[in-house]
Image: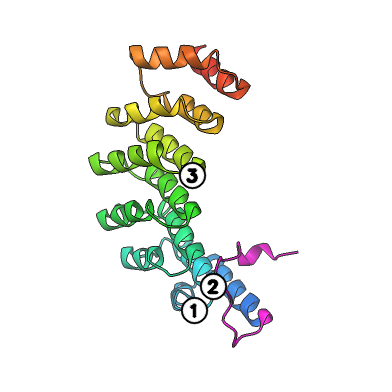
């Protein structure tokens, strides 16, 4: 059974010159650094050749509220998708109200790995209220991305941001596949108006019971 202290596996391959046991030890060191307050250890392990170690070290620095924008940006540009995904996830938690971090997340919306793009969308919805470019890019993902999970994440982020310019994309998503429709109905919560009322009325008659339930919760 995997040790929870070492975190999720990376998508990359382990460097061949080390044994698996050594990789596990280094991942444990990175995790413990975050619990012991060892910023220097965590920062040093950001440069490890094992992407799993780098990802855990990144999380350790965020846990210690010691991550810098430049370190988060470097992780967002990492060659390993697992590290990029962790960077996006940690950006949602890091106390960094920095435009460069937002810009990096916008770039990750275009990542070739759909799980990275999905996590970036989630992070943009969790950070301080988005501006016009953020809403516009999320709206494009919500309507055009080929991966349904990415569309769903973008719709959720638009609902979290609550900017009126994102409403057309949310309304369009109420006609997407069932998982996206459910998320879109929930994302309508901050909005009102005739179009919203019509979308909710239609959702009350949806063939998917979870879509109907979400609409009932909003209209009760």
**What whole-number distance in Å separates the C-alpha atoms at marks 1 and 2?**
6 Å
Residue under numbered circle 1: 48
Which segment did they paint magenta? Answer: 1-21
Who comes first in sequence, dot 3 or dot 1? 1
51, 31: nearer the viewer: 51
Q: Are marks 3 and 1 in contact (CB under 8 Å)?
A: no
Q: Is residue 32 above or below residue 154?
A: below
- Residue 215: give x, y in percent of width and height: 52, 18
49, 67: nearer the viewer: 49
Residue at image position (53%, 13%) is: 204
Residue under numbered circle 2: 53
Q: Is residue 23 above or below residue 110?
A: below
Element class at badge 2:
helix
Residue at image position (52%, 72%) is: 51
Indicate which disc residue 168 carries: none
**Is 34 situated left or right of 101 in this image?**
right
Residue under numbered circle 3: 147
């Amino acid at each position: 059974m995997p040790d929870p202290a070492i975190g999720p596996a990376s998508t990359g391959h382990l460097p061949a010159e080390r044994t698996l046991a050594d990789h596990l030890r280094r991942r444990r060191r990175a995790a413990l650094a975050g619990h012991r307050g060892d910023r220097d250890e965590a920062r040093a392990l950001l440069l490890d050749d094992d992407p799993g170690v780098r990802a855990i070290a990144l999380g350790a620095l965020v846990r210690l509220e010691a991550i810098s924008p430049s370190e988060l940006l470097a992780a967002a540009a990492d060659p390993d998708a697992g590290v990029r995904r962790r960077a996006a996830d940690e950006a949602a938690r890091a106390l960094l109200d920095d435009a460069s971090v937002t810009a990096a997340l916008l770039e990750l919306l275009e990542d070739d790995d759909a799980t990275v793009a999905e996590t970036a969308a989630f992070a943009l919805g969790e950070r301080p209220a988005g501006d016009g470019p953020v809403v516009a890019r999320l709206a494009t993902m919500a309507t055009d991305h080929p991966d349904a999970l990415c569309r769903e994440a973008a719709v959720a982020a638009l609902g979290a941001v609550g900017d009126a310019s994102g409403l057309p994309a949310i309304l369009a998503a109420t006609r997407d596949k069932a998982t996206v429709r459910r998320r879109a109905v929930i994302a309508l919560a901050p909005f009102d108006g005739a179009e919203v009322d019509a979308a909710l009325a239609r959702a009350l008659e949806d063939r998917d019971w979870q879509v109907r339930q979400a609409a009932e919760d909003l209209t009760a």
